[in-house]
Amino acid sequence: MGVVYRNSYPWADRSLGGLESSMTFSSDADEVFHHLQVLDDKSDILSHLPMAAYVVRADGVVIWYNARAAELWGRRPVAGDTDERFCGAHTLFRADGSHMAHCDTPVALALSTGASVHEEEVIIGRPNGSRVHVSVHIDPIRNPSDGRIIGVVNYFSDLTERKRQEAEREQLLREAEKRSAELREARDELESKVERRTTALRHLSSQLIHAQDEQSRRIARELHDSIGQYLSALGMSLTQLENENGSKSSETLAECRQLLDQCINETRTLSLLLHPPMLDEVGFASAATNYGQEFARRSGIDTDISLELPFRLPADAEILLFRVLQESLTNLHRHSGSHRAKIRAGIDGDAVYLEVTDYGRGISREILENFKTSGNGVGVGLAGIRERIREVDGKFDLHSTSDGTILRVSLLATNSRASYRHAAGAR
């Protein structure tokens, strides 16, 4: 009985030059395959297939192949040669590079199981030692009368170029990852250096600020305890002279009295600005209230003060808040044009806050944004305040519109009660 091979693959129609895709073979089939070989040799129709193709009998002997198959194999086996059964190549390898015996090839398995194989990758080892990656597509040829497998057809495409490109891409990716890792390492090292330098600069800045505070405290104490005492003594002497002398010298004494009073007031003001004694003696709330009142008296700005601090704060926190208050009121007086000021302080959870509000012309949006991003544009005073607040992990907020400006700082006040009791006990 004849054998009908019904091919469902597009290469069959192209290879046979438009002949019907249903072919009848003899029971042996070798004769028909021989004619295919002759057709391939004479017309080049099958040789121009874009895919390599070959046919094997049920025993695995290659009985027909086209020129593309020979090109990929790197050899032209003699049809019927049993040395390279099932594959037509001397050596085959799996996709992972391991050796594949001829009896384990996809063609051999398709002959033994009758299952088709599609897009399975194998590697052809050529006689010259080179290798070619291919993707195979295999279908069995059956006898239509009894379904017996009498052979298989295998057509396969070259993956070598694609594999080369994939290898190049993987190599480029590895190099890119290596460079990226090197850049990350360099960046991390640079960031570490910057962080160390920043920490060192902040530490130095903190030391300088503390040294400045100590110097201000010492000068204020000298003004109060030394020069202030001398001026007081001079005042008592002037009083005695006024009592002893007549009206002839009263005019000169009055002028001296006026100059003396001005010196005493200026000395007290300088002492208050540098480091008010009340800050050490009774704490920030009292010192800030007194400072706000003096500010209102000297500037003529109506100042509303409300400080709700039920306990003393650590010494460093009180000094920091007082410096913030000083700088805020100085800027308010010099730049805002406001006739009113509001000072608020209190406890908010674990934090103590200080808020100074004016009702002046405000800060322009451009200057404010520049300050928030780079720290520039509003003078060194506010920049210094922000840095000092950052040193203690506090918060600094500056909000301004055409209706005025609000400056608010906050810092942790945890254990302030305990710190105060400890400090009070030490005193």
Image: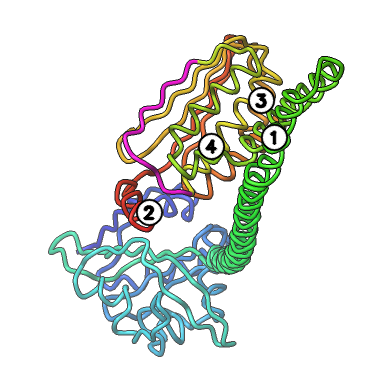
Residue 57 horizontal/vertical position (percent) = 31, 75
The residue at which mark 1 appears reads as 267
Q: Which mark is residue 423?
A: 2
Q: Which mark is residue 317?
A: none
Type of the residue with mark 1: Thr
Whole-Å distance between the Cαs marked 3 and 4? Answer: 14 Å
- Looking at the rendered structure, the secondary structure element under dot 2 is helix
Q: Secondary structure at mark 3?
A: helix
How far from the left and from the top, in percent, is residue 64?
Answer: 43, 72
Question: Quick one: label 3 or label 1, which is nearer the N terminus?
Answer: 1
- Label 4 SS: helix
Residue 2 among magenta residues: no
Q: Earlier in the sequence, mark 2 or mark 3?
A: 3
The residue sitting at 53% across, 50% down in the picture is 391
Point 64% across, 40% down: residue:
274
Element under disc 1 = helix
Indicate the quadrant containing the C terminus: top left, top right, bottom left or bottom right.
bottom left
Q: CA distance from mark 2 to mark 1?
A: 29 Å
The magenta-colored residue range is 304-315
User: Is 276 situated above or below 105?
Assistant: above
- Which residue does the image show at 60% across and 28% down from the upper left? 328
Label 4 sits on what residue type? Phe
Is residue 355 something that shows in the picture?
Answer: yes
Residue closest to the eye, 245 or 220: 245
The amino acid beneath tag 2 is Ala
Q: Disc 2 vs disc 1: which is toward the camera?
A: 1
Dot 3 corresponds to which residue? 331
Residue identified by numbered label 4? 322
- Looking at the rendering, which quadrant does residue 114 occupy? bottom left
